[in-house]
Protein backbone atom coordinates (compact mmCIF):
# COMPACT_ATOMS: atom_id res chain seq x y z
CA UNK A 1 0.00 0.00 0.00
CA UNK A 2 1.57 3.26 -1.20
CA UNK A 3 4.97 1.58 -1.20
CA UNK A 4 8.00 3.74 -1.86
CA UNK A 5 11.63 2.82 -2.04
CA UNK A 6 14.34 5.42 -2.60
CA UNK A 7 18.07 4.75 -2.63
CA UNK A 8 20.39 7.58 -1.57
CA UNK A 9 22.98 8.80 -4.06
CA UNK A 10 26.24 9.64 -2.28
CA UNK A 11 28.52 12.21 -3.79
CA UNK A 12 31.50 14.48 -3.23
CA UNK A 13 34.45 14.18 -0.93
CA UNK A 14 32.31 13.77 2.19
CA UNK A 15 30.05 11.17 0.61
CA UNK A 16 26.97 13.13 1.52
CA UNK A 17 23.56 12.23 0.17
CA UNK A 18 23.15 14.40 -2.90
CA UNK A 19 19.93 12.94 -4.23
CA UNK A 20 17.80 9.85 -4.43
CA UNK A 21 17.08 7.16 -6.97
CA UNK A 22 13.34 6.90 -6.74
CA UNK A 23 13.15 3.23 -7.62
CA UNK A 24 9.59 2.57 -6.43
CA UNK A 25 7.19 5.48 -6.31
CA UNK A 26 3.96 5.00 -4.44
CA UNK A 27 2.58 1.73 -5.73
CA UNK A 28 -0.36 -0.28 -4.36
CA UNK A 29 -1.61 -3.73 -5.27
CA UNK A 30 -2.82 -6.99 -3.75
CA UNK A 31 -1.90 -10.60 -4.42
CA UNK A 32 -4.46 -13.27 -3.66
CA UNK A 33 -3.65 -16.65 -2.18
CA UNK A 34 -2.86 -19.20 -4.90
CA UNK A 35 -2.58 -16.73 -7.74
CA UNK A 36 0.34 -15.55 -9.83
CA UNK A 37 0.72 -11.85 -10.25
CA UNK A 38 3.08 -11.03 -13.09
CA UNK A 39 5.05 -7.78 -13.02
CA UNK A 40 6.56 -6.58 -16.30
CA UNK A 41 8.59 -3.59 -17.35
CA UNK A 42 11.97 -2.69 -18.81
CA UNK A 43 15.13 -3.14 -16.75
CA UNK A 44 15.52 -0.51 -14.08
CA UNK A 45 11.78 0.13 -13.71
CA UNK A 46 11.71 -1.02 -10.09
CA UNK A 47 10.38 -4.58 -10.46
CA UNK A 48 13.10 -6.30 -8.45
CA UNK A 49 13.18 -3.55 -5.85
CA UNK A 50 9.43 -4.01 -5.39
CA UNK A 51 9.82 -7.77 -4.97
CA UNK A 52 12.65 -7.43 -2.48
CA UNK A 53 10.94 -4.74 -0.45
CA UNK A 54 7.82 -6.92 -0.18
CA UNK A 55 9.98 -9.56 1.51
CA UNK A 56 11.73 -6.96 3.66
CA UNK A 57 15.04 -7.89 2.09
CA UNK A 58 15.21 -4.12 1.62
CA UNK A 59 13.92 -1.51 4.04
CA UNK A 60 11.03 0.54 2.72
CA UNK A 61 11.12 4.31 2.38
CA UNK A 62 7.39 4.69 2.94
CA UNK A 63 4.13 2.76 2.73
CA UNK A 64 3.03 -0.57 4.16
CA UNK A 65 3.25 -4.24 3.24
CA UNK A 66 0.63 -6.57 4.66
CA UNK A 67 1.02 -10.33 4.72
CA UNK A 68 -2.24 -11.99 5.75
CA UNK A 69 -3.11 -8.89 7.70
CA UNK A 70 0.25 -8.36 9.44
CA UNK A 71 2.26 -5.31 8.47
CA UNK A 72 5.72 -6.80 8.03
CA UNK A 73 7.73 -3.65 8.69
CA UNK A 74 6.17 -3.21 12.12
CA UNK A 75 6.29 -6.87 13.22
CA UNK A 76 8.48 -7.78 16.20
CA UNK A 77 11.65 -9.61 15.18
CA UNK A 78 10.56 -13.09 16.38
CA UNK A 79 7.32 -12.83 14.41
CA UNK A 80 9.20 -11.72 11.34
CA UNK A 81 11.58 -14.69 11.57
CA UNK A 82 8.59 -17.03 11.59
CA UNK A 83 7.03 -15.24 8.65
CA UNK A 84 10.32 -15.34 6.74
CA UNK A 85 10.00 -19.09 6.30
CA UNK A 86 6.71 -18.50 4.49
CA UNK A 87 8.10 -15.90 2.08
CA UNK A 88 10.93 -16.85 -0.26
CA UNK A 89 12.67 -15.66 -3.40
CA UNK A 90 14.07 -17.27 -6.53
CA UNK A 91 16.78 -15.10 -8.08
CA UNK A 92 17.40 -14.29 -11.70
CA UNK A 93 20.87 -15.61 -12.15
CA UNK A 94 21.36 -19.26 -11.27
CA UNK A 95 25.10 -18.84 -11.91
CA UNK A 96 25.81 -16.31 -9.21
CA UNK A 97 23.06 -17.02 -6.70
CA UNK A 98 24.47 -20.40 -5.66
CA UNK A 99 27.60 -20.60 -3.52
CA UNK A 100 30.15 -22.54 -5.64
CA UNK A 101 31.83 -24.02 -2.55
CA UNK A 102 28.72 -25.70 -1.20
CA UNK A 103 27.11 -28.94 -2.28
CA UNK A 104 23.47 -29.07 -3.27
CA UNK A 105 22.72 -30.71 0.09
CA UNK A 106 24.30 -27.76 1.87
CA UNK A 107 22.70 -25.10 -0.33
CA UNK A 108 19.18 -26.47 -0.09
CA UNK A 109 19.55 -27.80 3.46
CA UNK A 110 21.11 -24.71 5.05
CA UNK A 111 17.81 -23.09 5.98
CA UNK A 112 16.39 -26.37 7.31
CA UNK A 113 19.24 -26.68 9.79
CA UNK A 114 19.14 -22.98 10.68
CA UNK A 115 15.45 -23.10 11.51
CA UNK A 116 15.84 -26.35 13.42
CA UNK A 117 13.60 -28.28 11.01
CA UNK A 118 16.10 -31.04 10.35
CA UNK A 119 19.30 -32.30 11.96
CA UNK A 120 22.55 -32.16 10.01
CA UNK A 121 23.42 -35.43 8.30
CA UNK A 122 20.94 -38.02 7.16
CA UNK A 123 17.84 -36.10 8.14
CA UNK A 124 18.78 -33.06 6.06
CA UNK A 125 20.02 -35.18 3.17
CA UNK A 126 16.76 -37.14 3.03
CA UNK A 127 14.71 -33.99 3.03
CA UNK A 128 16.91 -32.32 0.40
CA UNK A 129 16.73 -35.41 -1.83
CA UNK A 130 12.97 -35.27 -1.61
CA UNK A 131 12.83 -31.56 -2.50
CA UNK A 132 15.23 -31.73 -5.44
CA UNK A 133 13.35 -34.69 -6.81
CA UNK A 134 10.21 -32.59 -6.72
CA UNK A 135 12.15 -30.05 -8.76
CA UNK A 136 13.13 -32.63 -11.37
CA UNK A 137 16.65 -33.55 -10.22
CA UNK A 138 17.69 -37.07 -9.29
CA UNK A 139 18.40 -37.47 -5.54
CA UNK A 140 22.03 -38.56 -6.08
CA UNK A 141 22.79 -34.99 -7.17
CA UNK A 142 22.82 -33.77 -3.59
CA UNK A 143 26.56 -34.34 -3.22
CA UNK A 144 27.48 -32.38 -6.33
CA UNK A 145 28.51 -28.73 -6.69
CA UNK A 146 26.77 -25.98 -8.70
CA UNK A 147 29.37 -25.93 -11.49
CA UNK A 148 28.52 -29.52 -12.35
CA UNK A 149 25.05 -28.51 -13.51
CA UNK A 150 23.59 -26.80 -16.56
CA UNK A 151 21.84 -23.43 -16.26
CA UNK A 152 18.38 -24.97 -16.17
CA UNK A 153 19.44 -27.48 -13.52
CA UNK A 154 20.98 -24.73 -11.43
CA UNK A 155 17.73 -22.82 -11.49
CA UNK A 156 16.01 -26.00 -10.30
CA UNK A 157 18.41 -25.95 -7.35
CA UNK A 158 17.53 -22.30 -6.73
CA UNK A 159 13.86 -23.24 -6.72
CA UNK A 160 14.51 -26.19 -4.40
CA UNK A 161 16.30 -23.87 -1.99
CA UNK A 162 13.25 -21.57 -1.96
CA UNK A 163 10.95 -24.54 -1.32
CA UNK A 164 12.95 -26.07 1.54
CA UNK A 165 11.02 -24.33 4.28
CA UNK A 166 7.60 -25.05 2.81
CA UNK A 167 6.81 -21.47 1.87
CA UNK A 168 3.45 -20.00 0.89
CA UNK A 169 4.60 -17.03 -1.14
CA UNK A 170 7.52 -16.83 -3.56
CA UNK A 171 8.91 -13.85 -5.42
CA UNK A 172 10.26 -15.19 -8.69
CA UNK A 173 12.64 -12.46 -9.85
CA UNK A 174 13.23 -13.09 -13.56
CA UNK A 175 13.80 -16.80 -12.87
CA UNK A 176 14.14 -17.72 -16.54
CA UNK A 177 15.74 -14.61 -18.04
CA UNK A 178 19.26 -16.04 -17.90
CA UNK A 179 18.22 -19.34 -19.49
CA UNK A 180 18.04 -20.52 -23.10
CA UNK A 181 14.58 -20.15 -24.59
CA UNK A 182 14.31 -23.93 -24.95
CA UNK A 183 14.86 -24.34 -21.19
CA UNK A 184 12.63 -21.44 -20.15
CA UNK A 185 9.35 -23.25 -20.69
CA UNK A 186 10.56 -26.28 -18.71
CA UNK A 187 11.31 -24.12 -15.69
CA UNK A 188 8.04 -22.22 -16.02
CA UNK A 189 6.11 -25.48 -16.24
CA UNK A 190 7.93 -26.72 -13.16
CA UNK A 191 6.94 -23.57 -11.26
CA UNK A 192 3.33 -24.04 -12.34
CA UNK A 193 3.29 -27.71 -11.27
CA UNK A 194 4.79 -26.83 -7.90
CA UNK A 195 2.24 -24.09 -7.45
CA UNK A 196 -0.60 -26.50 -7.96
CA UNK A 197 0.98 -29.17 -5.83
CA UNK A 198 1.94 -27.00 -2.87
CA UNK A 199 -0.69 -24.25 -3.13
CA UNK A 200 1.94 -21.56 -3.71
CA UNK A 201 1.36 -17.89 -4.45
CA UNK A 202 3.77 -16.13 -6.83
CA UNK A 203 4.88 -12.67 -7.68
CA UNK A 204 6.50 -13.36 -11.05
CA UNK A 205 8.81 -10.65 -12.34
CA UNK A 206 9.94 -10.47 -15.96
CA UNK A 207 10.88 -7.96 -18.63
CA UNK A 208 9.33 -10.27 -21.20
CA UNK A 209 5.57 -10.06 -21.77
CA UNK A 210 5.45 -13.39 -23.56
CA UNK A 211 6.98 -15.11 -20.51
CA UNK A 212 4.55 -13.67 -17.95
CA UNK A 213 1.63 -14.39 -20.24
CA UNK A 214 1.94 -18.11 -19.74
CA UNK A 215 2.17 -18.19 -15.98
CA UNK A 216 0.21 -15.16 -14.68
CA UNK A 217 -3.41 -14.73 -13.62
CA UNK A 218 -3.12 -10.98 -13.48
CA UNK A 219 -0.39 -8.71 -14.80
CA UNK A 220 0.94 -5.38 -13.60
CA UNK A 221 3.00 -3.13 -15.84
CA UNK A 222 5.66 -0.89 -14.30
CA UNK A 223 7.35 2.12 -15.81
CA UNK A 224 10.07 4.11 -14.05
CA UNK A 225 9.04 3.10 -10.54
CA UNK A 226 5.30 3.43 -11.04
CA UNK A 227 2.63 0.83 -11.62
CA UNK A 228 0.85 2.13 -14.74
CA UNK A 229 -1.63 -0.67 -15.43
CA UNK A 230 -2.91 -3.80 -13.68
CA UNK A 231 -5.49 -6.20 -15.11
CA UNK A 232 -6.46 -9.86 -15.47
CA UNK A 233 -4.15 -11.41 -18.06
CA UNK A 234 -6.61 -11.88 -20.92
CA UNK A 235 -8.02 -8.42 -20.48
CA UNK A 236 -4.57 -6.85 -20.55
CA UNK A 237 -3.60 -8.59 -23.78
CA UNK A 238 -6.95 -7.96 -25.45
CA UNK A 239 -7.48 -4.42 -24.32
CA UNK A 240 -4.37 -2.68 -23.05
CA UNK A 241 -5.36 0.83 -21.98
CA UNK A 242 -2.11 2.51 -21.00
CA UNK A 243 -0.03 3.83 -23.93
CA UNK A 244 3.07 2.19 -22.43
CA UNK A 245 1.41 -1.22 -22.21
CA UNK A 246 0.22 -0.79 -25.80
CA UNK A 247 3.79 -0.13 -26.90
CA UNK A 248 5.16 -3.13 -24.99
CA UNK A 249 2.54 -5.45 -26.46
CA UNK A 250 3.10 -4.16 -29.97
CA UNK A 251 6.71 -5.34 -29.73
CA UNK A 252 5.83 -9.02 -29.22
CA UNK A 253 6.37 -10.92 -32.47
CA UNK A 254 3.40 -12.86 -33.85
CA UNK A 255 4.08 -16.41 -34.99
CA UNK A 256 1.73 -16.08 -37.97
CA UNK A 257 3.51 -14.45 -40.98
CA UNK A 258 0.21 -13.35 -42.58
CA UNK A 259 -0.61 -11.24 -39.54
CA UNK A 260 0.89 -7.83 -39.12
CA UNK A 261 1.06 -5.79 -36.00
CA UNK A 262 1.63 -2.07 -35.98
CA UNK A 263 4.66 -1.74 -33.85
CA UNK A 264 4.64 1.34 -31.65
CA UNK A 265 8.15 2.70 -31.39
CA UNK A 266 8.74 4.87 -28.35
CA UNK A 267 10.94 7.88 -28.76
CA UNK A 268 13.94 8.49 -26.51
CA UNK A 269 15.28 6.50 -23.60
CA UNK A 270 13.93 5.83 -20.15
CA UNK A 271 14.67 8.93 -18.06
CA UNK A 272 16.80 8.55 -14.94
CA UNK A 273 14.88 7.49 -11.82
CA UNK A 274 17.10 9.97 -9.93
CA UNK A 275 15.39 12.77 -11.80
CA UNK A 276 12.05 11.49 -13.07
CA UNK A 277 9.80 13.68 -15.25
CA UNK A 278 7.08 15.71 -13.55
CA UNK A 279 3.42 14.79 -13.86
CA UNK A 280 2.99 11.49 -15.67
CA UNK A 281 6.44 9.90 -15.65
CA UNK A 282 5.79 8.55 -19.13
CA UNK A 283 5.03 11.93 -20.71
CA UNK A 284 8.48 12.39 -22.28
CA UNK A 285 7.93 9.26 -24.41
CA UNK A 286 4.17 8.97 -24.69
CA UNK A 287 2.71 9.30 -28.22
CA UNK A 288 -0.48 10.78 -26.69
CA UNK A 289 1.00 13.21 -24.18
CA UNK A 290 -1.01 16.37 -23.54
CA UNK A 291 -0.15 19.59 -21.69
CA UNK A 292 -1.87 18.30 -18.58
CA UNK A 293 0.36 15.22 -18.48
CA UNK A 294 3.43 17.32 -17.70
CA UNK A 295 1.91 18.66 -14.53
CA UNK A 296 -0.62 16.28 -13.07
CA UNK A 297 0.30 12.82 -11.83
CA UNK A 298 -2.43 10.53 -13.19
CA UNK A 299 -4.27 8.65 -10.48
CA UNK A 300 -4.08 4.84 -10.51
CA UNK A 301 -7.75 3.91 -10.60
CA UNK A 302 -10.09 1.08 -11.45
CA UNK A 303 -11.65 1.91 -14.83
CA UNK A 304 -13.35 -1.46 -15.41
CA UNK A 305 -13.79 -4.45 -13.12
CA UNK A 306 -10.31 -5.36 -11.81
CA UNK A 307 -8.69 -3.21 -14.49
CA UNK A 308 -6.56 -0.41 -13.08
CA UNK A 309 -4.74 2.22 -15.07
CA UNK A 310 -2.92 5.49 -14.45
CA UNK A 311 -3.48 7.72 -17.49
CA UNK A 312 -5.34 11.00 -18.11
CA UNK A 313 -6.57 9.71 -21.46
CA UNK A 314 -8.49 6.77 -20.07
FE1 LIG B 1 0.47 9.50 -21.93
FE2 LIG B 1 -0.61 11.48 -20.57
FE3 LIG B 1 -1.55 9.02 -20.30
FE4 LIG B 1 0.82 9.69 -19.30
S1 LIG B 1 -1.16 10.47 -18.66
S2 LIG B 1 0.33 7.86 -20.43
S3 LIG B 1 1.56 11.09 -20.86
S4 LIG B 1 -1.61 10.28 -22.14
MG1 LIG C 1 15.60 -6.88 -11.92
Image: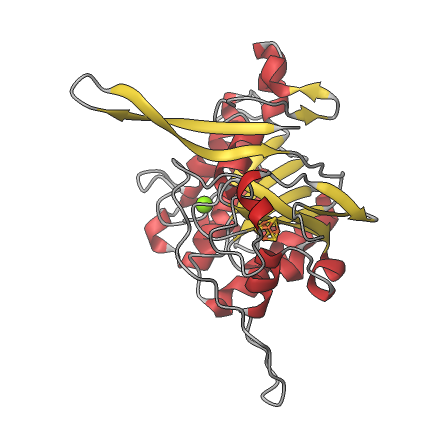
At 58% from the left and 76% from the top, the residue drawn is: 262
**Can I make out residue 130 in this image?**
no
Question: How many numbered marks appear?
Answer: 0
Asked which quadrant contains residue 82, the reply is: top right
Ligand 2 resides in the quarter of the picture at top left
Which one is in front, 251 or 104? 251
Question: What x and y, as percent, mark residue 297?
Answer: 60, 38
Quadrant (top left, top right, bottom left, bottom right) of the N terminus = top right
Residue 162 found in image quarter? top right
Residue at the far right: name it: 305
Q: Is residue 118 left or right of residue 91?
A: right
How far across and down, in percent of the image, does residue 4 sit?
Answer: 54, 28
Nearer to me, 190 or 37: 37
> Residue 76, relative to residue 107: is it above or below?
above
Q: Residue at x 58, y 88 (%)?
A: 257
For the view shown, which residue lies furthest in the front direction? 291
The image position of residue 286, as x and y in percent, is 53, 56
Q: Nearer the viewer, residue 240 or 313?
A: 313
Q: Going by the picture, which residue comes out furthest to the left?
A: 13
- Asked whether residue 266 appears in the rendered view, the answer is yes
For image coordinates 60% across by 58% down, the residue present is 243
- Image point 62% across, 46% down: which residue? 228
- Percent x, y of residue 299: 67, 39
Name the colour scheme. Answer: secondary structure
Answer with the quarter of the image where residue 54 lies: top right
Amino acid sequence: KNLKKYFPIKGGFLKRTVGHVRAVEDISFTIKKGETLGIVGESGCGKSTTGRTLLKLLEKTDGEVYYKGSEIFSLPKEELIKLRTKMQIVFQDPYSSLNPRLTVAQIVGEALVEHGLAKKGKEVNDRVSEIIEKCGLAPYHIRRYPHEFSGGQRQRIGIARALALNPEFIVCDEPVSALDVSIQSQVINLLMDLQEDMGLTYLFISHDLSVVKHISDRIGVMYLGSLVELAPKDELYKQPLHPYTQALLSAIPIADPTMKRNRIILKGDIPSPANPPSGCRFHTRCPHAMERCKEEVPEFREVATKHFVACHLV
